[in-house]
Amino acid sequence: MAKGYRAHVKPKSVQTPVGKDATLIDIAEVKHQAEDFFEKNRNLILGGLIGVVILVGGWLSYKFLYQEPQNKEALEQMYQAEFLFEKDSFALALENPGGGFAGFAEIADQFGGTPAGNLAKYYAGICCMQLRQFEEARSYFEDFNAGGKVMPTLKNGMLGDVHAELNDIDKALEFYEKAASGTENELLTPVYLKKIGVLKQKQGDNAGALLAFKTIKEKFPNSPDGNGIDKFIIPLE
C-alpha cells in the first residue's frame, strides 16, 4: 500500500446494547425517571401517604377505642330488655326494662351505629308490631341493617307484615315477594309464599294466588305451610 494512502473505512453503526446490558440500562433509566418523578411530586406523594395513615389510624381508633366499647355497653344494656322480650313483655322491653337498664328504643337511638344497637332496631320493630304501633315499627325495620342470608328475608317479611297491617296491600306484596325470592329457606320461604297467595286472593288475583300455593306444594311439601296446602289450592282450580 502506497505511503500516504488512506483506506476508506465505512464507519460502524452504533449498536444498541442487548441482553443483560440493555436490561441494566433500562432499569437505570426507569430508576432515574422514578426518582425525578418523586422529586417533582414529593409534597403530593407524601401528603397522600400521610392522608392514608390518618384515615387508617382514624378507622382503627374509631373501631377499637369507640365502637367496640360502645358495642359492649349496648350488649350489657340490652340484657334485661331481651329477658323481658322473651316473656312477651313488649312494652317494658321497648321502653322501660327497669333496674337501670335501657329499653330497645333507647339502645337503638344511642348505639345505632354498633352491631348491638343495630339489632336493637329489629327487636324494637317487633315490639312495636306487637303493640300495634305500625308506623314506628316500619321506621325501625327500615333503619335495621340486615346482613347474612336469613336476616334480609326476615326484614323484608316484617316490612311486608307492617304494610299489610297498614292496609297497603301492594306494598306488602312487594316486600313478601322480596322475602320469598331471596335465599330459599325451608321454613321461611313457604311462609311468605302463603302470605302472597292469601293477599293475591284477597285482591281477586286467583291465578297469582294459585301459583303461590302450588309453588309451596311443589318445592316445600314437607314444611309446616306445605301440610294442608291443598285446602287453599282446590277451591282455586
Image (tube, grey):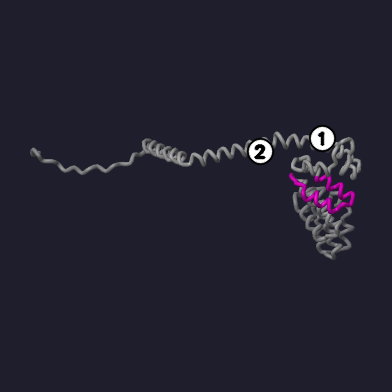
Residues under numbered marks 1 and 2 in contact, where contact means CB atoms less than 8 Å apart: no
Magenta residues, start to end: 121-147
Residue at 52% from the left image edge and 40% from the top image edge: 45
View extreme (front): residue: 43
View extreme (left): residue: 2
140 falls in the magenta region: yes
Q: Position of residue 43 (x, y in %)?
A: 51, 40
The answer to which quarter of the image holds residue 166 is bottom right
SS class of the residue under badge 2? helix
Q: Residue 76 carries which label?
A: 1
182 falls in the magenta region: no
The answer to which quarter of the image holds residue 91 is top right
Mark 1 vs mark 2, CA separation in Å: 24 Å
Q: Position of residue 54 (x, y in %)?
A: 61, 37
Query: Quadrant of the image for the N terminus?
Result: top left
Judging by the rendered image, the residue that carries numbered circle 2 is 59
What amino acid type should be assigned to the residue bearing mark 1? Glu
Q: How many marks?
A: 2
> Can residue 216 be seen by looking at this rendering?
no
Of residues 203 and 168, the one drawn nearer to the viewer in this rendering: 168
Q: Where is residue 231 in the image (x, y as percent from the top left)?
A: 89, 58
From what the image shows, is residue 195 above or below residue 60? below
Residue at 83% from the left image edge and 60% from the top image edge: 169
What amino acid type should be assigned to the residue bearing mark 2? Trp
Residue at 83% from the left image edge and 38% from the top image edge: 78
Tell whether 148 sits left or right of 13.
right
| Labels 1 and 2: the sequence-earlier one | 2
> Can residue 103 be seen by looking at this rendering?
yes
| Main SS, magenta residues | helix
Residue at 84% from the left image edge and 51% from the top image edge: 136
The answer to which quarter of the image holds residue 57 is top right
SS class of the residue under badge 1? helix
